[in-house]
Image: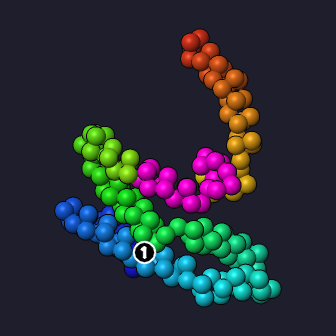
Amino acid sequence: ALSVMYFDKQTVAPTDGKDYYGKMIATLAGEKFSYMTDIEALKKIEELYNSNSLENSAKRELELRLRDLKEFKQIPKELYVKYIQAINDGETYWLKAKTENNYKLFKPYLINIIETWKEILKLVAKDTSDYGYMLDKYEEGMTIEIYDPLFEKVKTELLPFVKKIITEGKMIN
């Protein structure tokens, strides 16, 4: 139902109804959250993960799902719904701001998304910095210690090289 509502919101929903659609999507996401964090549902997923009946790809998919579910359990449902609502509102007004080339329309929604995400980070990023947590969440296994030397090299070697090419205006073979 969430996917269909989101698709409708993006394609056929009247512009004036997008705020309502966002609220309904957030409400349904809250129900999904209740199901995902249900102890019995979590036990069934863990049992399936621990069984020997899965192929590697399915086992990996369940491993990632369990990682997310354990994270969700640290977040109150109300905060999750608030975040989904903020994302939906933000997306609606980002599209409007983009169309009208007016960032100020989007700014308060972006601030709300960031502030709500910070509330979530306080609950889930206990063992690392917010940045470290997000690196690992979106690129598992990556850390500040891995990325910092890479970006330092970009700053010290690649940027001067690009600037030199721009200022000299020479073609590269």
Q: Residues within 10 Å of mark 1 (few under 14, many from 20)?
A: some
Q: Position of residue 18 (x, y in %)?
A: 26, 64
| 61 displayed left or right of 87 | right
Tell me what residue is drawn at x 66 percent, y 85 percent. 43
| Name of the residue lying farthest toward the left | 16
Q: Does the segment drawn in magenta span residue 51? A: no
| 15 displayed left or right of 156 | left
Q: Which residue is mark 1?
A: 30
Tell me what residue is drawn at x 36 percent, y 71 percent. 25
| Name of the residue lying farthest toward the top | 168
Quadrant (top left, top right, bottom left, bottom right) of the N terminus: bottom left
Instruction: Name above or below for residue 52 compared with residue 119.
Output: below
Depth check: 161 or 130 in front? 130
Can residue 153 be seen in this snapshot? yes
Q: Does the segment drawn in magenta span residue 122? A: yes
Span highlighted in magenta in the image? 113-133
Instruction: Name above or below for residue 101 compared with residue 54.
Output: above
